Image: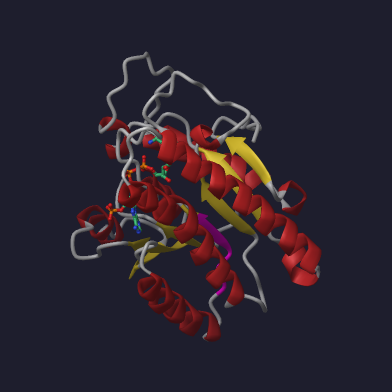
Amino acid sequence: MAPSTWLVVGASRGIGLEFVRQLLEQGNQVIAAVRNPETANQIWQLSAQPTRPGACLIEQCDVTDEASIDAFVDRMKALVSKGMKIDNLILNAGILKYPNRATEISFSDFALHLHTNTIGPIIVAQKLLSISSADPPSKVVFISSDSGSTADFRDHEDGFGAYASSKAALNQMLRHMAAELKRKGGKWQDVCVLAMHPGEVQTDMANNISVDWEVEGVINADESVEKMLKVIGEKDKSHSGTFWRWDGREHPW
Ligand code: NDP
């Protein structure tokens, strides 16, 4: 893909940080949105490395906090008004408090999963699209999960009720977003909205889970992101509203 401007939401650690690293390596301009810039040491280290061909701007955005989202979108609007185009948007922020069983989860923990994994990413995307109406992003990519696939329900996944539900709701909402943009016509019908399953990836999230079954095919963030960027690069508006695995295979909803 030719160098362009990418906005990655949830970029402090894990898969989000790796997206930023590889995108900078490829010479892109990256806006890295993180919940706590004060403690997001890895992204500051990455942006400070003079050998990276791309440029990195670090911004604050907590996807569970509407005031934080609005302030972030206002700052992006100011950049857009000065001629910046957000070419590609990656909504990566996510949380998994393990376990989150349907029979046990508290009201507040269930709400936290929905706020972080569903409502936050959708509202951030919606508001960023609204400030980009003159020239909308080509790709809006939501990092979902195979857990959110209702077609792929695995009853051995004891412990993932709220997380799976939050990703299933994300999947359904992003499909609506894709359909609504197509129906709006004009430049909106050129936006490609995708859901991606990144694989079973070795990150803090995965390390905080202990399950009593064998997790197969665990990959590192480097491989996951490299393959996801290839998949994202191959897609266009005709793929809007589809769900893909990191390895290029289409995922059932
Ligand atoms: P990590 O726990 O390593 O990283 C999660 C990222 O999300 C961090 O950057 C974190 O920021 C950010 N985040 C969490 N809450 C918020 C918030 N309220 N506002 C802004 N940012 C927030 O997880 P992964 O890198 O593994 O996961 C990335 C995505 O991939 C998630 O959406 C996850 O559900 C999905 N996924 C991961 C899989 C895996 O095997 N790892 C499998 C399937 C899907 P902070 O540092 O501030 O906490």
Q: Is residue 161 above or below residue 40?
A: above
- Let me know if residue 145 appears in the view: yes
Question: Is 46 placed left or right of 227 in the picture?
Answer: left
Which of the image's four quarters has the C terminus? top right
x 65%, y 70%: residue: 136
Q: Is residue 21 visible?
A: no
The one of 102 and 145 positioned closer to us in this rendering: 102
Looking at the picture, tell me which residue is in the foreground, 153 or 70.
Answer: 153
Q: Position of residue 123 (x, y in %)?
A: 51, 65
Q: Position of residue 85 (x, y in %)?
A: 57, 73
Rendered image quadrant of residue 214: top left
Horizontal side of 91 relative to 15 (left or right) equals right
Q: Which residues are magenta?
A: 85-90
Q: Residue at x 40, y 58 (%)?
A: 53
Q: Is residue 88 magenta?
A: yes
Count of numbered tags = 0
Is residue 228 rendered magenta in the image? no
Residue drawn at 47 percent across, 84 percent down: 78
Residue drawn at 24 percent across, 53 percent down: 42
Q: Position of residue 227 (x, y in %)?
A: 52, 36
- Choose between 75 and 19: the one closer to the eye: 75
On screen, 40 above or below 211?
A: below
